[in-house]
Amino acid sequence: MTITGVTYIKVSVVYFVIGVLLGMYMSIAHDYTLTGVHAHLNLLGWASFALAGVIYWLFPRAAASVLGKIQFWAHSIGLPIMMIGLAFVLEGKTSFESIIPIGATLVVVSVILFAINVFMNVGPRAGIRK
Ligand code: HEM
């Protein structure tokens, strides 16, 4: 599968829809237990991922690099694991606590790879899209 900036942007809008639906549910139900899940879906899933997608659209060489691919999959596997674990824990099911750091570690790895990728493959001579 080819990962491009567009792939990132399309995945990010799925998180956006889920994130705002959860926010809407919390507002209607007056139940703010899952605020932490809502905030992370919107900020890590939508905002950060869409921003990475725009950067990768501008700098296709960065998106096509091995770092860009590993980042995509580490984030796409890690964030759902982290969110499902967090949702269970916030609902009082603490036996799911141990899966949160597994997902969170994948997300942190993906962010670090993104930072390395930006330093290596984003710049004035890195083939910016005209
Ligand atoms: C229709 C869209 C949205 C609705 C209905 C909604 C609803 C809510 C509700 C009810 C809370 C809980 C407030 C509380 O605990 O007092 C909340 C918290 C939060 N929301 Fe949203 N939200 C929406 C969109 C967004 C978006 C787009 C973002 C970020 C990109 C976002 C980020 C956050 C954050 C960071 C918190 C935690 C704030 C805190 O605990 O201090 N929300 N939202």
Image (cartoon, rainbow, N blue to C red):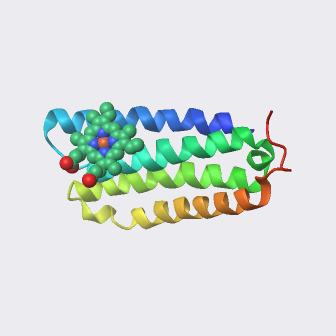
In-front residue for pair 88/72: 72
**Residue lying furthest front in this view?**
124
In-front residue for pair 79/117: 117
In-front residue for pair 12/87: 12
Instruction: Ligand 1: give its quadrant.
Output: top left
Q: Quadrant of the N terminus?
A: top right
Residue 128 lies left or right of residue 99; in this view the side is right
Q: Quadrant of the C terminus?
A: top right
Q: Position of residue 89 (x, y in %)?
A: 27, 59
Whether residue 122 is visible:
yes
Instruction: Give the residue at x 64% y 36%.
Output: 7
Whether residue 4 is visible:
no
Q: Position of residue 121 (x, y in %)?
A: 79, 55
Residue 105 lies left or right of residue 61; in this view the side is left
Q: Which image quadrant for residue 17?
A: top left
Instruction: Give the residue at x 53% y 59%.
Output: 107
Residue 93 lies left or right of residue 52; in this view the side is left
